[in-house]
Amino acid sequence: MAASTAAAGAAASDSQGPASPVPSMDGPTVQYSSVLEHLIGDKRTVKELNPAVMGGLPVPPKSDEQKMIERGMESCAFKSLLACVGGFVLGGAFGVFTAGIDTNVGFDPKDPLRTPTAREVLKDMGQRGMSYAKNFAIVGAMFSCTECIIESHRGVSDWKNAVYSGCVTGGAIGFRAGLKAGVLGCGGFAAFSAAIEYYLR
């Protein structure tokens, strides 16, 4: 009886097939740090953002006229002209503003007790505004031209270009009054340009 029971159990185990292996816990584990490196870390692959691939509108190639206009706008002559016009407008506004707050505008030094007319006051304001506009236009054109030339020569766009340009512009303006004034103008303009570049960058 016992022998028949054992034989039946063996036959049943053979019909069920081999036992499935138990998974071991000693296999390779997933390193989440490596996954993060590939997702958001240094090993992340940077895909090219092509508008045609991303579903956006493709950018048409630039024509020869557009390239010529871009080269003209990036030239030193155009930058100098733009700085000259901007300096003229800014200098004129500044001159008119300073003349408006000056209490001696329109007064005749030969007859200080006489009250100036509105025409005389406006004439003096216009003369001062024109003087400031010319000076600002010259300084702006010189600074922009020298900065563009220095940047083209160095091949680097950084704060040093503005410092060198400020020194050249200040020295050229100051040398009209002597060597000492030229050195002081160079240092003053260079320091001012460095401060402006540091604030803007």
Image: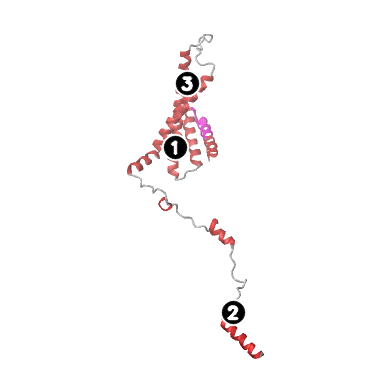
Instruction: Tell me, for residue 128, which label it has, or none.
Output: 3
Q: Are marks 3 and 1 in contact (CB under 8 Å)?
A: no
Chain-order first, disc 3 or disc 1 = 3
Q: The disc labelled 3 sits on which kind of residue?
A: Arg
Q: Quadrant of residue 123?
A: top left
Instruction: Tell me, for residue 146, which label it has, or none.
Output: 1
In the displayed orientation, state which residue is furthest to the right. Answer: 2
Chain-order first, disc 3 or disc 2 = 2
Residue at disc 1, secondary structure: helix
Q: Main secondary structure of the magenta part?
A: helix
Assess disc 2: are there few (<14), some (14-19) or many (≥20) residues with their C-alpha within 10 Å of its C-alpha: few
Looking at the rendering, the stretch of residues picked out in magenta corresponds to 177-189
Q: Is residue 42 visible?
A: no
Q: Is residue 4 magenta?
A: no
Residue 66, given in percent of the width and then of the height, sits at: 35, 42
Front-lying residue, 196 or 32: 32
Front-lying residue, 120 or 39: 39
Instruction: Tell me, for residue 19, which label it has, or none.
Output: 2
Front-lying residue, 38 or 86: 38
Q: The disc labelled 1 sits on which kind of residue?
A: Thr
Alpha carbons under labels 1 and 2: distance apart: 87 Å
Q: Is residue 41 above or below residue 125?
A: below
Residue 27, given in percent of the width and then of the height, sits at: 60, 71
Alpha carbons under labels 3 and 2: distance apart: 104 Å
Please identify, in this view, whether the residue under mark 3 or under mark 2 is nearer the observer.
Answer: 2
